Every structure is written in C-alpha cells, then in structure tokens.
Amino acid sequence: MAAPEDPHRRRVGLLYDERMCRHATPDGEIHPENPDRIRAIWQKLESEGIPLRCVVLSAKEAEDKYIASVHTARHIKLIKNISSKKFNSQRLRIASEFNSIYFNKGSSEASYLAAGSVMEVSEKVAKGDLDSAIAIVRPPGHHAESDEAMGFCLFNNVAIAANFLLNERPELGIRKILIVDWDVHHGNGTQNMFYNDPRVLFFSVHRFDFGMFYPASGDGSYCMIGEGPGAGYNINVPWEQGQCGDADYVAVWDHVLLPVAESYDPDIILISAGFDAAVDDPLGGCCITPYGYSLMLKKLMGFAQGKIVMALEGGYNLKSIADSVLACAKVLLEEKPLVGSIKAQPLESTWRVIQEVRHELKTFWPALSVELPQKVLVSNWRPCSVELNLSSSSESIVENDGGASVTICATNFVEIIEPLSKLNIDEDNHGKAITLDHIATDKSPVVLSEECPNAQALMPDKNVDGCTRWRSVLSKTEVWYGSYGSNMWKPGFLCYIKGGKVEGMNEPCPGSQDKSSPKGVIWKTVPHQLFFARSLTRTWGKGGVAFLHPESNKNDKAYMCMYRITLEQFNDVLLQENSLHQENGKSQGAGAPLLDLSDIGVVAENKSLPLEALKAGWYSNILYLGEEDNLPILTMTKFCRYNEKTESKSIQLDSSLCIMAMYHCTLGLMLHREQKNAS
Ligand code: X5A
Ligand code: ZN
C-alpha cells in the first residue's frame, strides 16, 4: 500500500516529451546535440523512480505572441516554416547560413515545445502550484539571438519564459528574475535580450579562454555588465581555461553569485542548466561532478523561497548529463541531505577571475567590494598541468581540451612552422641560443647573462644624480606595457615591478625602483604571432621563452595583457627582461635610460626600435603596438629579421615549440611554468 501523501513533500515538476526528440540532423549524421540526450536523462530518472515522486507534465507549444517578446517576426516565421514541405529542398542551405545549426522536419515542433514547456513550468512555479521544476527540453536556447538561431539553439526558451512571467503574468508577483546560466558556453542570446533590463539579473559562468571558446566573441567577458537601467544586472564569470570543476564553481557561487543573489532578492530563479561543464563532456573540458551540481543547486534554493526552474541547455555526454540531472532532481525533492565532498582546490586562475568580476561589479553590489582575505587567495588554489598531444589526423583543434590536453592537426601545424622558419635571428651572439640543438636536448643550456658582454658596460652606476634626474622625468610619463608569455600572469609580471619571485622562477627579481602597482590592466589581442624558444634563463629556469614576431600580420593573433606603468618602470622591466639588472651587486639603470621620451616618437613611427645597448639581450627590440587611452602600447621582443631566402641561422622550431606557441595563443597559459613542473 502506498504511504499517505506527505504534506511537507516538495512538489517538483518534471517535464519531458518524446516529441522533442523529432528534432534531429536531417540525414542521421552524428551530432552531439541529438535526441538521445533527453532520452538518456528521462530513462535515468525513471530507473530511479524519480517521476513517481514528481509532478510529471507534458510539453505545450509556445504561442507566437509570447515568443515575439524576445524574437523578431522574421525569426519566428523561419522557425515556424522551416519544417514544412516547401522548405525540403532549402533546409540544408538555410541551416548552413547559421552558426552551428541544423534543421529537419521535426525542428519547428520541437522548438515550439521546448519554449512552451519552459514557460509552462515557470508559470506553475511562479504561481506556487509547484515548488520547483525541471524541464528536460531540446533544442536548447541560450545562444539564440532575437533574430538568429545559433549554437544548436533555435528559440531562447529561458528568455521567453522570463519575459512571459514579467509581462504577461503580473498578478503572479514576479518582478525580479535571476537567470543562472551554468552551461559551459556563454549565454549570449539571453544576455542580449535583457542587457538593459534590471528586472532580469543574468549571471553566466562559462569558458571564455580569452575569447577563443565558443561562441568566441567578447560578449562573455566580465566587462559586459549591462547597460542603461540594466547596468550591474549582467554578470559574466569567464574562465580562462578548461579544467574547472566543483571547487571552482563553488568558489564563484560563494564569492560572486550568492552575495549578489542575497541583495538582489529575486522572486524566482531560472537556471539555464546546460550540463556540458560536467566531467567527461566531449565539448566542455571542465569537470563538475553530479555532487558539484547538487551543491550549486542547493545553494540557490535559499533564495526566491526555493522557486527554481531548471531548463536543459547543453550537455553532450549521455551518462554525465543523466547522472547530473538525477542529482539535481534529488536536491529539489529534498528527501535526503546531500552527501559528497569536493576533491580539489580552485585553480589559481579562478581566484584571478573572481577578483576581476568582483572589482568590475562592486559599485553595483556593495557585498562584492569587501577584499577577499589574503589567506583564501594564496592558500586556496592548485596549479594545473598541461599535456600536449600532436595528432596527425585531419581533425581541427578539438574543442574539448579533455581537461588537460589539446589536439592540433598537422595542417595547422605547417601553417605555423612555415612563416616562423623564415624568421631569422640576426647573426649575433646568441642566435644559437634557440637553435635546434638546445631545443632538442637542453644539453648545453645558455645562461643569458654570460653571453651578454654589454651588461657590464651598461652598469657604470657612477652618476647617481643623473640617474635620479631621468627617473624623475620618466616617472611622469605612462605607457602600456604589453605583456605576453609568462608576464601575462600578473603575479609573474609584478616581480618585475615589486621584486621577488614566484613559483617557477630561479632567483628573485630586484623589481623596479618605483614599486607602485600598475595603474591599469587590460587584455587585448594584437595582430602578431607569438613564438617560443626553449632554453634556460636566469630568471625563469628551464622552459619556453616567448617572443612576439616583430612584424604584424592581420592573420595572426596573440593575446596580451597590458599593464599601465610609468616609462621609468618600463625601463626597469626592460633591464630585468634582458637580465641586466644588479650584475655583481651594482644597482640598475644608472646613467641614462635605455628608452627615453624622445624614443617613443621614433618607435611609434617605425613600429620597432632595436636598442643597440641591449643588442645581446633577449628582448632588445622595442615594439609599438598602437595606443590605448592616448598612451602608447609598448613591448619588447627579440631582434630578428624576416628573410625569405636564407635558410641558415633561421630559428629552428621543433613541433613541441610550435604546439606551445599555438596552445599559448589559444589558452593564454603559463607554459614554461608547466614545463618546469613536469621536468
Ligand atoms: C547549447 C550549447 C554549444 C554550441 C557549440 C558549437 N551549444 N560548437 O551547448
Ligand atoms: Zn553549452
């Protein structure tokens, strides 16, 4: 006999409808976003007896007038008609005009059902007929823009439901909606639809990889905070890399999302619940466990009186998504307390991202302006290790970095090697420092300072007054120092300003004489190629040494972090980068600056300025990379010539260095630190 109905039992809505499986690739091609996704979830829930404990609902098609609150008439017309006979011959071509979209005869119906289903459960939760709900829908929605299908998404299901509650059901008292988008991809569509609207707080945590991860635009950056009345009501947490897992997400919940939710005090929470950040997902490269998802969900149940709607977005590993949704269903049912534990610590980059986001939004959300305790920041992170695989197949870069590895195809590879093999190091002292011998064996490592006879000459340290004078003049001019390679990593770069050493450095840097912090930090791409040589440096020990190709090329792209510092500090960085500081106890940069005020005009005009005095250094060539806030962007690289003909003495690059360069460009990781860890 069935137990009497427990009056305290949570009423959890569960919506699934087989008709949403009819949206599929037209000729049965394999695709990650396929009908088995929702089938696998439903089967799993059934096998665990979940539907028996929930209120099971079936799907309803959304009405056009509600869809029209976020989509254009043109877009609605397209999705409505795309499955009809008269489009049979055009479907393929039309789909190909969109980014990552397919259509078939079932697409129209499935998209109307997905949108209508999320509306349906949202209304029931808003009313209080249900405590919470899970809508197991497809196609997903969060990439869909008002006039454009993209990223496997046709209608923006969650946005349609949010607008429906706000505009069509005012009597339900839903005035403020928190949308939490934990799909591994940025919810660009949803962001855009509510960018000016303070009634919807859109929060998305996603892989960004410095703009390289799908949908690969700047929209997912933490700078996108909303506009007009919506300013402060759009929050992006952009991961710098894959490998993020439970610890990283929970850190973001504790230090960004929950403090904001607390003061926003939403009336309902809609979760754009993609499960492609789950462990083993083929696209995401992250590693949230089912326990991690349950914790993230549990922590949200303290808001909006527990009114939570989960709408499926992405998630492409059938087992992972089924296990994750099951864990979430159990949380909503609140039958048993959570059991589990978080295995790892957050990544180092997670704290950097959290601090960036908090800094960006603290004027809107005072709870974010409290400084995070240093103890949390320094003790609570793990370094990550990177593994590189070279594939000779014709696949392109695999989107998934598998948590730690990247596969790069052989054709890309040639494209990288070819131009670099024509880049000639001048036949001076240490072109040999990056020839194949050293790269391949590391047998006779070259310690730069030993090869740098000018170092002594440069350090007369007689004229203390003269020194003080140029320093005081140059301290009044600011420039952007464009950092790449390991210097992009702020704690690493700060060693050149503040002094000291970070993990991976062989010996401490003296720092700049003026130790004040950079006045600004911005990320930017420049049309230059980044390349690597491997050797041994005094400062960094064994590992890859990054250089920027001195000539720009519009097809190249290198990620750089710009630090706003004084020209005096730039000179001190220049000295340290060329290992010319504090030789034999002498103080640095005495008589005259290496780069004076008048040189800035010269370098701006010629784009580059090789410094004779530093000829023997690794970074003797000053590059001008444009302007930001009317200040020049300067960096330093190796002095090399571009020569189509000469074969000898050109930079010898082996495959691992090319992959390092490409990997770095892609992910902005601190490669030589990893290398050191590995060796
Ligand atoms: C909903 C979702 C991913 C699109 C990836 C396209 N879309 N390469 O996860
Ligand atoms: Zn996704």
Image (spheres, rainbow, N blue to C red):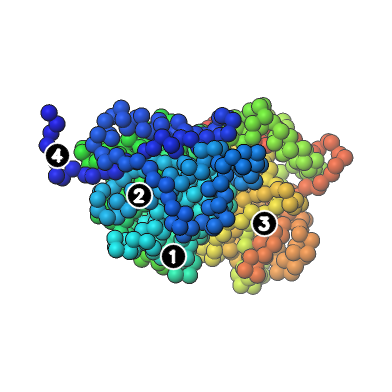
Determine which residue is flagged by label 3. Answer: 635
Measured as percent of width and height from the top left, residue 147 is found at 56, 55
Which residue is at the front of the view, 185 or 437?
Answer: 185
Tell which circle, 2 or 3, labels the residue nearer the N-terminal end.
Answer: 2
Measured as percent of width and height from the top left, residue 231 is found at 45, 66
Q: Residues within 10 Å of mark 4 (few under 14, many from 20)?
A: few
Disc 2 + disc 4, Cβ < 8 Å: no
In this rendering, position of residue 449 left or right of residue 201: right
Please tell me which residue is depicted at 71% across the width and 33% down the height of the picture: 411
In this rendering, position of residue 94 left or right of residue 646: left
Judge whether 442 appears above or below 529 on screen: above
Disc 4 + disc 1, Cβ < 8 Å: no
Instruction: State the quadrant of the N terminus.
Output: top left
Which amino acid, mark 1?
Answer: Asp
Give the CA distance from mark 2 to mark 1. Answer: 23 Å
Measured as percent of width and height from the top left, residue 634 is found at 67, 60
Determine which residue is flagged by label 4. Answer: 5
Give me the disc on residue 120.
Answer: 2
In this rendering, position of residue 261 left or right of residue 519: left
Give the CA distance from mark 4 to mark 3. Answer: 70 Å
Disc 3 + disc 1, Cβ < 8 Å: no
Determine which residue is flagged by label 1. Answer: 197
In this rendering, position of residue 545 left or right of residue 53: right
Give the CA distance from mark 2 to mark 3. Answer: 56 Å
